Image: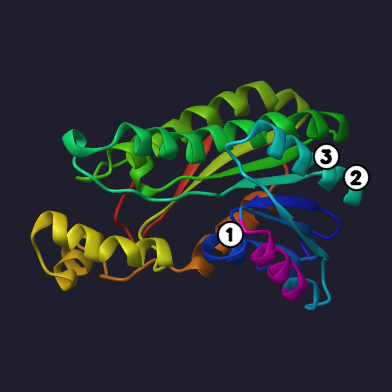
Amino acid sequence: MKLKGKVAIITGSASGIGAAIARRYVEEGANVVIADLNLEAAEAKAQELSALGSGQAIGIAMDVTSEAAVNAGVAATVQHFGRVDILVSNAGIQIVHRIEDFPFADWKKMQAIHLDGAFLTTKACVPHMKRQGGGAVIYMGSVHSHEASPLKSAYVTAKHGLLGLARVLAKEGGEYGIRANVICPGFVRTPLVDKQIPEQAATLGISEDEVVKKVMLGETVDGQFTTVEDVAEVALFLAGFETNALTGQSFTVSHGWHMG
């Protein structure tokens, strides 16, 4: 029960990586807020996790691009559980185009969800963490926080930006016991990734099998996808590591795709 009594807000956690992190946190005794754009799915996931009998979970609607929605969600968390110890900024989407074909509206949407969402949730949680004497902020980056790939200008830009935000928070939050780190997964076989396979095949003029073997897994050491459970274990480790020895860092979980 490494997180017994801790309260965690996890954005985009009704499914995928966020849901796996939420499950792992609840298993370790945390009280978890499933913050998702889809309230029905968030409440269903919260009910499922509460039934595990370790920590509690509640579901709330949160549009991470709306300052009012984020502030309301954090306030509801503190009202319900009395505090917030852990923020996992996980909400994200993917849109792929070549730079010259990238609609500006889609570019802005990508930056809003990934970067504005991380900033707004951080801004709302930090005052509570300061009053409590510390906390952990975990951003969901990507191998694309360090590497670039064709068709992903908006995503790569946003994921690089999370490194900067984490490092500034590490500097500003250190004296208050607030730690900030970035998890950088490789390709994880979620619906987000499944959607990319035919899109990239069409844009690059190759088969879907080639997208998987060459584009997605070609740089790994074993040709394997990273799992949601792999990422959840790293998120658990970072949430439970309570000193500034690990802050302002990125942790790559990618079967060796990116090293360093």
The residue that appears at 19% across and 38% down in the rendered structure is 101
- Residue 79's label in the rendered image is 2
Nearest the eye: 132 or 62: 62
Question: Residue 46, percent across and down?
Answer: 74, 67
- Badge 2 crowding class, 10 Å Cα cut-off, few under 14, some 14 to 19, many 20 or more, is few
Q: Is residue 1 magenta?
A: no
The residue that appears at 37% across and 57% down in the rendered structure is 186
Magenta residue span = 38-48
**Based on the displayed image, in which of its 4 quarters is residue 69 positioned?**
top right
- Residue 18's label in the rendered image is 1
Q: Is residue 43 magenta?
A: yes
SS class, disc 3: helix
Q: Pointers 1 and 3 in contact (CB under 8 A)?
A: no
Task: Name the mark nearer the viewer: 1 or 3.
Answer: 3
Q: Earlier in the sequence, mark 1 or mark 3?
A: 1
Residue under numbered circle 3: 75
Q: Pointers 2 and 3 in contact (CB under 8 A)?
A: yes
As drawn, 18 above or below 27: above
- Badge 1 crowding class, 10 Å Cα cut-off, few under 14, some 14 to 19, many 20 or more, is many
The residue that appears at 77% across and 39% down in the rendered structure is 72
Answer left or right for 142 relative to 75: left
Amino acid type at circle 2 is Gln
**Based on the displayed image, in which of its 4 quarters is residue 42 positioned?**
bottom right
Q: Is residue 156 visible?
A: yes
Answer left or right for 59 relative to 226: right
Task: Tell me the distance, in whole angstroms, between the alpha carbons under discs 1 and 2.
Answer: 23 Å
Amino acid type at circle 3 is Ala
